[in-house]
Image: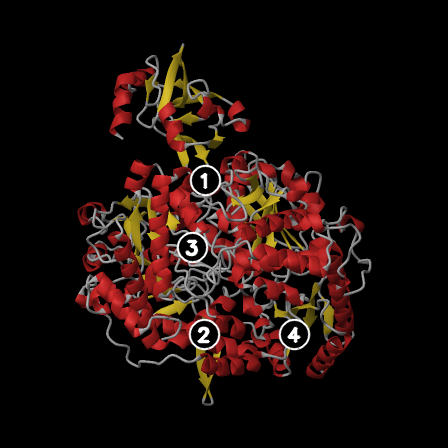
Amino acid sequence: MSEIPSDLKYSKSHEWTQDEGGVITIGITDHAQELLGDIVFVELPEVGAEVGTEDECGVIESVKAASDLYAPLAGEIVAVNEELVDAPEQINEAPYEAWIFKLKPSNPAEMDELLDAAAYTEVVESE
Amino acid sequence: MPFIPHTEAETRSMLDAIGVDQIATLFEEIPTSLCANAPQQPEQGLSEMEISQLMRSRANADDGVTCFAGGGAYQHHIPAAVWELTTRGEFYSAYTPYQAEASQGTLQLLYEYQSMMSSLMGMDLSNASLYDGASALAEAVLMAVRANRKSKSKRILIPKTVHPNYRKVVHTLVRHQGIELVELEYDAKNGTINPDSLKISDEDPGYAALVIPLPSYFGTLEDVHTLTDWAHSHGMLVIGSVNPIAMASLTPPGEWGKEGADIACGEGQPLGIPLASGGPYFGFLCCRKALVRQLPGRLIGRTRDLDDKEGFTLTLQAREQHIRRSKATSNICTNQGLMVTAATIFMSLMGTTGLEQMASGSYSNSHKLVERLSTIDGVALAFSSPYFHEAVITLSTPVAELLQILATQKIVGGIDLSNDYPELGNALLVCATELRSDDEIEQFATALEQILC
Amino acid sequence: MLIFEHSQSGRINSAQRTAALQPLQEIPKAMLRKQRAQLPEISELQGVRHYTQLSQKNFSIDTHFYPLGSCTMKYNPRGANTLSMQSGFLNRHPAADAELGQGVMTSLYDLQEILCEVTGMEATSLTPAAGAQGEFAGVAMIRAYHDAQGDTARSEILVPDAAHGTNPASAVMCGYKVKEIPTNSDGDVDLETLRQVVGPQTAGIMLTNPSTLGVFEREIEEIAALLHQAGGLLYYDGANLNAILGKTRPGDMGFDVIHINVHKTFSTPHGGGGPGAGPVVANKRLAPYLPIPMVGVKEHEGTSHYHWLTEAERPESIGRLSAWSGNVGVLLRAYIYAKMLGTTGMERVADYSVLNANYLMKQLQKKGFTLAIPERRATHEFIVTLKSEAKELGVSAMDFAKRLLDYGHHAPTTYFPLLVPECLLIEPTETEDKATLDAFVEAMVAIRQESKENPEQVKEAPLTLPVRRLDDVRAARELDLNWYNQ
């Protein structure tokens, strides 16, 4: 069973989110990186881009698969983790440390619609 | 039954094993309403002897022709070993190297190809081939639009000195993706783009890329350095569409301007592939390293096996249709592997010196040809600028009829430009590669003299 | 060893000299190459030996059983190669006057006619260079047809979830959105869903029949009616035509346009990944939109003269797909093969490819392997799922595939279609004999036994090939695509 920290919130598309004082940090879950296998490339969103809820905003590639990265909530991309360009394996090694992008939500209330750890555990188990 | 090994007894025992009494039962899931009527004229197959008689007579009917046409397809010398090796069954009858361990021959060869082609183009890397020079240009255009994130423009500048059929193919292949091709005129005197005529106003939404041919379709040489720097200074990527034999001697895309072209593509046919009525050829596509994830088609990487031994494998497959499906960089699956096999062996056996000799021989024969033809009344060189291994000449009579008369003497006299470039008048694109002898050039000139006089 | 490692500076293969090296006098200096290209400097023998040895590291049809599902790896007749490589065919310039190429043009025209006949269609264009380009052409023709009707609201192409990845990719290149249609458990398209999603936004559907699951789509007539009633058109992906050659025709099933992979059904070589050819064949409705050029015929003084049909004669065409006229050399091989079969031989192709597949399927089932769709007849291919082996023995379909290489069989297609877990898509083709099929069954049984007794051996396979399992992750993370850049 993969790790699902209780202090984070999750999307059904397997992103984790952490509210850091109005800016949301986003990565992919342990479960998602396990499914993908060895990650070889991350296409990061563009800083400054406006994204809608569940918009595709990047791509994560492993050797045999490619998975779109979705914005769990609408807002403006304010930072991306450039380290992942040269070291995408960080996502495999520590999925909850290797954040991918930070977003300033246009509607912070959307945070409430994300899943808590228990609800996300159910999503993972039902797959 | 050609190529089917089953004896009656074997067929019977296989049917018994399946538990049916006849082969027809195996097709029982096809609705009877769909079962094909017997063909109106059932035709027995031909034996190899019979088909050989038919195809020998057809090939002989087409044989014995002397070719002075280029225009994207060139008759060059091909070492005998190239096709002897290429048609070995192990290359000829293998498939795409999905099982890397069982395909190291093809994979290593493709890696060698990528390396040689990158070096010839002066670029960082090459893919393992596309269909032909025209579709390679279309893929380069699509790639540039994806890659040029800064520009956000989906407009491409494409000069009229690019092969007319390439421009048509690019149009067919990219038109449904909202990409606009904007054509650039050429200078009537020089037959090249005039860099001074290029102006972009501040209101102009800009372009994602500029295509630069070298040599141009007319055989002339574009001012690639100035054009490249101009395009880069306006936020465009630069796509070179080039002839690989010419690149042995002329400045390759990687050396253009201050920074070099971003993408190089072209027709691989001159590298050991016979004319064969237009195909199969292969397209090549090279780029700088930063664009690798936008590159379509197969890519071969060198890696290590479990014992730390060197090996080769398909890599970055997540760009491709079998994984990315509707989001792939291209729909290409099968490429032109066997043609690349020939080209790789060709480049190895010729070496850099061999390619330079071929370029030099084609240059000097084309100049001999044009100089000789220019002595004929009613023949003139269309453009005053230098040309590489083909040139446009203008004639005092319509070209189509002239080519037909030459054809009766088994001479392909060149390519008629009057449909694609009516403004040039009776214009003919002629070429003489290193293969054309002085006698053949003289025969062509004499025939032309007789027609024009 | 790489060819570059045989290279010695200053070694020239002078047997291949073509001309004296002279300065290109009129070329401005700025236009000349600054740094010489780096190509290998080797002797002819070094080159011949190197590439002969490389070839020997390949599995191929000529050397091994190659049951790669969906690829139709059957014998490529040597006669077709020899006859296509005659100088009259090889030395013809594509822009040469048609009168200088009546031999090749006659053959291409005949092939157009043969392909119309076997598919039940109206007209053929031979120009697409491969299956994917044929798909693009077919969908672009559907689009051209709707556009010509002024029907521009159609924005969607339907594609079954089991389809080959080129289908959705081709539809997107034509500017369409792709809607996936689920497949039901017995392998047919889910008709209920289809009824719900077909509508005025539907441009068409892309189907392979038999499907990539190796079964015949039994509801095809109803699907065709459903689409046509809604104003949509049907595109047939000819990847699996081998199974029905001479038995039933896409035109009779209601398809409007089809591409044929001649490198599958018409036995032209796969060449390590091409060149193929993907002619498109259309019914009356779509024929005007076929890509150019096509071969036409005129009668003059009692003889037939063949010539190219281009924009002037085919104004509604979707246009050109290649600089010239497609992969003519490949098409000649297909023509020779078709003539050697005759119409009677074509039906035998379907008969024996289906017999071989059903026999192999049955033998594997008898040995305890699980079939993906056990209640259906196989067509020319079928799917084994190793889900229970993976669960109980810890060996995957990939492990089986790699171990099969040690047993001298090329692996079947693995992990496609994506719907079936741990799957092997197996296509023996009609040109294999019974003994070869039996040997394959024995190998599968032996590998399963090894998986019980010595699973590590299977997981580390192959053990006897030129290399062992390769590090794909390293290949992707530490990209090494060019020897000169190391």
Q: Is residue B430 left or right of residue C212?
A: right
Separation (CA) of disc 1 from disc 2: 43 Å
Labels 1 and 3 share a subunit: yes
- Residue C420: image location, x then y, percent: 29, 44
Check contact, mark 4 vs mark 2: CB within 8 A.
no
Q: Dot 2 falls on which chain?
A: C
Separation (CA) of disc 1 from disc 3: 17 Å
Mark 3 is surrounded, within 10 Å at the Cα level, by few (under 14), some (14 to 19) or many (20 or more) other residues, namely: many
Quadrant of the drawing holding the C terminus of chain B: bottom right
Which residue is found at the position 44% from the left and 56% from the top? C133
- Residue C335: image location, x then y, percent: 44, 73
Residue A24 can be seen in this image: yes
Q: Amino acid at mark 3?
A: His
Task: Identify the mark nearer the N-term, 1 or 2.
Answer: 2
Separation (CA) of disc 4 from disc 1: 61 Å
Mark 4 is surrounded, within 10 Å at the Cα level, by few (under 14), some (14 to 19) or many (20 or more) other residues, namely: many
